[in-house]
Image (cartoon, coloured by chain):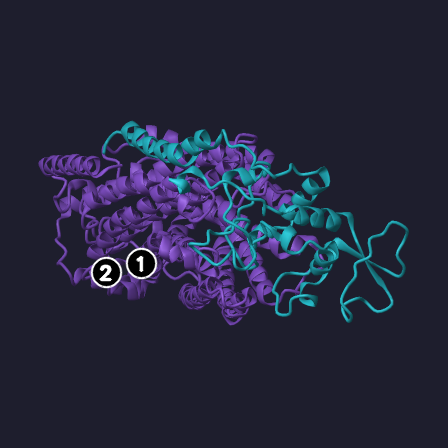
Chain colours: A cyan, B purple
Amino acid sequence: MENEYKLLSGAMVTLALATATLVVVPYMQLSDTHPSEGLKPYTSAQLRGRQQYIDNGCVYCHTQQPRAQSQAPDFKRGWGRAPVAGDYYYDHPHLLGTMRTGPDLLNIGARQPSADWNLGHLYQPRAYTPGSIMPSYPYLFEVKDKADKGDKVVNLPPGYAPVGQVVVARPEALDLVEYLLALDRTYPVKPPPEAAR
Amino acid sequence: MNTITLLLLTFILSVTGLFVFIWSLRHHLFDDNPAAANVIFSEGEIGKIEEPAATADQHRALQEAVDATHAPAADAARDARMAVELVQRVQADRSTAYVTFVFLACAVVWLIFASTAGLISSIKLHQPDFLTDYAWLTFGRIRTLHLNAVAYGWAPMAAFGIAIWTLPRLLKTELMGGRFAILGAMLWNAALIAGLGSIAAGFNDGLEWLEIPWQIDILFVIGGALIGLPLVFTLQNRKVKHLYVSIWYMGAALFWFPILFLVGNLPGVHFGVEQATMNWWFGHNVLGLFYTPVALASVYYFLPKIIGRPIQSYNLSLLGFWALAFFYGQVGGHHLVGGPVPSWLITLSIVQSMMMIVPVLAFSVNQHLTMRHHFKTLIYSPTLRFIVLGGMMYTLSSVQGSFEALRSINTVTHFTHFTVAHAHLGLYGFFSLVMFGAIYFVMPRVMSWEWPYPKLIALHFWLVVVGFGIYFIGLSIGGWLQGVAMLDASRSFMESVRVTIPYLEARSVGGAVMTLGHLVFAVHFVTMALRYGRKRVGPALFHKRSADPMATPVAVEA
């Protein structure tokens, strides 16, 4: 080819096609998505926790998209039903994830509804799940000689708490657990029209 | 869609295909070697090798290996005309020397940073209590620092450096407005430092590949535009009529990337599940429409130059270009197979992923046929080893990628380390190896100085090949086992974790060996920049040799 304008316009047309199919059409098709019935907006504490989830990179090991029963045994593992677009109505940015170094978390709030369990697990995952390769997050906690008034003391299994001291959750950890407990999309939904057809 | 419509569509498509075929025959698109493939050579240069990274011995042996395939024809008048053109090429090289050096030096710094971050992340996956006391060292952040330092540091800096060096040569003119590129490089690197700093500190947009806060992205856009300007100016001042295929790839890539980056980072537009489709449209196109074409352009330029032989089928390379441009852009949806997104989108992406076999085969066949009878040159040319192996990795990673998009395979591999191994096969096995080769070719021309310690080039090569071999094979096996375990409802989830541990350890070993290779490379680069090492044939080899019409490897010896 001898004409750079032809070359560039050709290149732009192919990119425009790709953008149309992967960005513009989904934008139009999904823009009238309604929140699923039973889905509540996040509270401000949950949103702060969600930001912790993002800032600490939880998404690189945990998905938030259980697969359908026809594809994988996610439901049998207690990870929940296949989600629909409306389940993510309040999610900005999306946190679907691409990696399952750890389990899917879309319904962790239903699976592990105990705040104590979640806090302790963040402090030292191996205290609850032997062999887990999840990092511990000591910087989300404080080790003190004595808990002050209003402190949330983390109840750890015997042998994991520092001797003679208490582990206190920082606000970041409390927010993050608020968010994890809010991850509960176990309410029933109508199957998407495509699946029904 | 009913059967009649499908049949009708197939019929129309086949008839159109037939017409395209007839048209391409009439336009001689099936000729083996049109003149266009020769534009990168001066008259009479075909059959003469160019390999700045080789020592005198390697150089001579390389030329002999090429001569063995066809006898060189002597023609004094032609050699004189060639000499004039080569002087012009030296001028083109001089005009890019400083700018190219700045980009490549930045690339090397980011390579070392990214390797270190990658190695730390890798160790953390089997030693989860390693370095957990500081937030910025937690896995989620250090892994992201690794990705961003590669994606916006090493890869684009190397790509820009090579593109800026190659384009004036291809256009037979000097680089125009190199100062804009220097300013652009400064802004880009400032943005990257700010971006990595904010990820480490926990400010993050939350989308894979798009983590850097959008406010900082504005700097990237301005910097990128400034880097693009000299390329536009140079294109306008070109002295060649035909645009060689490398220019297609590089030119298109340099226009595609800013659009991808801009759309991907628009704040407040994307929402919910739509954001996920945009996310992977961006994530895959950065690979497919930026790094891949730049590396392919490098292969299409450096490989023929080194062995002094035009590519086998020039038209096949053009077919490869348009097929890549069309198919690659739409494959991103395969990252969401089984996800809550419209199913037509996923099917489309799977189909286009399979179609990617077309451009990949076009490239692989071409590379193989060009190298045929010349594989002996790999022994003597340090540069060619990197480039040819990189090209082979392109074939391997692309074919692997096409099959990974299929639902049946995707179900096993998608959420596992298998995908991580695949990503590294593309961006490391293919892109980075080609860039290493290109840098070994380019730097002697940039510095007018030989690589001080040729043995270090070989050491670098073997370290990264062995290291990456361990990395890739180990992680692929581990990832596959992980996926199989996860699909078996009778096995606990923890089993899918435990089964990967030995392979994750192997990955750390491989990664450490690769990092060692990068350190060797970086040290060699620094000694080169400081002009260490004894003079063997001296810098005169690089500029004067070209100006001397009688320059043959025999003269080099003297």
**Residue visible at 56% across and 54% down in the picture:** A79
Q: Does residue B158 appear in the picture of this structure? A: no
Dot label at residue B392: 1
SS at mark 1? Answer: helix
Other-residue count near label 1 (Cα within 10 Å), few / some / many at <14 / 14–19 / ≥20: some
Disc 2 secondary structure class: helix
Callout in the foreground (2, 1): 1
- Quadrant of the snapshot with the N terminus of chain A: top left
* Chain under callout 2: B
Q: Quadrant of residue B83?
A: top left
Residue at 39% across, 62% down: B536
Number of marks in the image?
Answer: 2
Answer whether labels 2 and 1 touch (C-beta < 8 Å): no
**Residue in view at x 23 percent, y 60 percent:** B63
Using the rendered image of the protein, determine whether residue B542 is visible from the camera's viewpoint: yes
| Residue type indicated by callout 1 | Met
Crowding at dot 2, Cα within 10 Å, few <14 / some 14-19 / many 20+, comes out as: many
Same chain for the residues under marks 2 and 1 in the image: yes
Pointer 2: what residue?
Answer: B63
